[in-house]
Amino acid sequence: MTNLESRPMQLEQFLPYRLAVLADAVSRSLAAVYAERFALTRDEWRVLALLAESGPIKSTELGLRATLDKMQVSRAVTRMERDGLAERQTDDADRRNLVVRLTPAGRALHKKIVPMAQARERFLLDALEPAERAAFDAALDKIHARARQLAEQG
């Protein structure tokens, strides 16, 4: 029995809980940029950022990459279309699929948000020394790989 297994579980020390709390705190901090200043939801921000990064993309692929379900993608893209930030078109290669792309207004909004988001990221990461940052990135990658393994195992 390992030390971890021999002690009673304390929620505040439970890795999934700690990661969720951290992700929530970071997301709330970033939401101050995209929600309060630009009236975007978290899902819209993810879609905006991914479209800016990838260019036109199938809505199914968008959901996978943004870790959003079909309904979340649909709602986000619908609101973004309403606001003139994105547009959907039928995929020429497969008429059953929709391709989503940013409009010029969407690209301009992304350009405004990115420096503010990066400044917040820098502020958070400046708490770590370069070696700590490298170790943190490596640890996140390893834990993420293990989490995917567990998900595949069911």
Image (cartoon, rainbow, N blue to C red):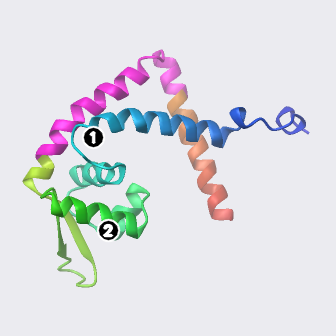
Element class at badge 2: helix
Look at the numbered discs 1 and 2 and tell me whether their residues touch, using CB distance below 8 Å.
no
Residue 74's tag is: 2
For residue 36, above or below residue 104: above
Element class at badge 1: helix
Q: Quadrant of residue 121?
A: top left
* Front one among 29 and 138: 29
Quadrant assignment for the C terminus:
bottom right
Residue 61 location in percent, x, y? 35, 66
Span colored in magenta: 108-135
Q: CA distance from mark 1 to mark 2?
A: 19 Å
Q: Is residue 143 left or right of residue 70?
A: right
* Residue type for callout 1: Tyr
Local crowd size for mark 1, using a 10 Å CA cut-off: few (<14), some (14–19), many (≥20): many
Quadrant assignment for the N terminus:
top right
* Residue type for callout 2: Ser
Q: Kindly identify the residue that appears in the image at 24 percent across and 75 percent down.
A: 98
Residue 34's tag is: 1
Q: Kindly identify the residue that appears in the image at 63 percent across and 56 percent down.
A: 149
Residue at the extreme left: 104
Q: Kindly identify the residue that appears in the image at 25 percent across and 30 percent down.
A: 116
Local crowd size for mark 2, using a 10 Å CA cut-off: few (<14), some (14–19), many (≥20): some
Q: Is residue 100 left or right of residue 20?
A: left
Residue 72 location in percent, x, y? 38, 63
